[in-house]
Amino acid sequence: MHTPIRCFPSLWRATVGTLLALLVSASVLATPLSSQDAKAVREVIHAQLDAFAADDAEKAFSYAAPSLRKSVASAQYFMAMVRGQYAVVYRPASVAYLQPALDGKVVVQPVQMSDTEGASWMVVYTLERQKNKQWRISGCFLKETSGRMA
């Protein structure tokens, strides 16, 4: 099921860490997002977080981009994956949106979150605009950061 995480945890962490650094670096060099699009991006992420909080798998899955939906078997599997591997996203204690940026056709939205134990996490979402002009989440990468949040 998610063998790379179980079999190669240090390689997986290094890969995710590198990817996060690249995404954040790219967002610094990318084009700023209009305030209207930035608001729409935050609303999509917030709506998905609300769906996780309500344990509404179908609704949470509906905010995923088609490419992500295609790679995940079902809404229930998606919810189980988030619960098991993205616990801070499933039940964040706090959420603070940082400045998003447009990198080509993808929005990079960094979000500072804390988990229920007070650990701080950098969560980087990627979103794609769909043909109907709505933003959908195409990826979510996270890394625990040093320090704790009160």
Image (cartoon, rainbow, N blue to C red):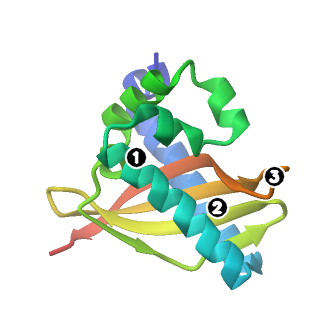
Q: Can you tell which of label 2 and label 3 is closer to the viewer?
A: 3
Can residue 9 be seen here? The reply is yes
Q: Along the horizontal axis of the image, is 96 left or right of 72?
A: left
Counting from the top left corner in percent of width and height, residue 8 is at 43, 27
Q: Quadrant of the C terminus?
A: bottom left
Instruction: Look at label 3 and name its amino acid.
Output: Asn
Residue at 17% across, 56% down: 116
Sequence-first disc among 2 and 1 = 2
Residue 140, horizontal then vertical, whole percent: 53, 49
| Side of 86 relative to 67 (left or right) | left
Disc 2 + disc 3, Cβ < 8 Å: no
Q: Residues within 10 Å of mark 1 (few under 14, many from 20)?
A: many
In the picture, the disc for residue 2 is none
Residue on which disc 2 sits: 22
Amino acid marked by disc 1: Ala
Check disc 3 and report the residue beneath it: 132
How far is disc 3 from disc 1 in space, using C-alphas? 22 Å
Element at badge 2?
A: helix
Q: Is residue 8 above or below residue 87?
A: above
First of labels 3, 1 by sequence position: 1
Residue identified by numbered label 1? 51
Coordinates of residue 124 in the picture (x, y in percent): 53, 59
| Local crowd size for mark 3, using a 10 Å CA cut-off: few (<14), some (14–19), many (≥20) | few
Q: Amino acid at mark 2?
A: Leu
| Mark 3, secondary structure of its residue | loop
Q: Residue at x 70, y 73 (%)?
A: 37
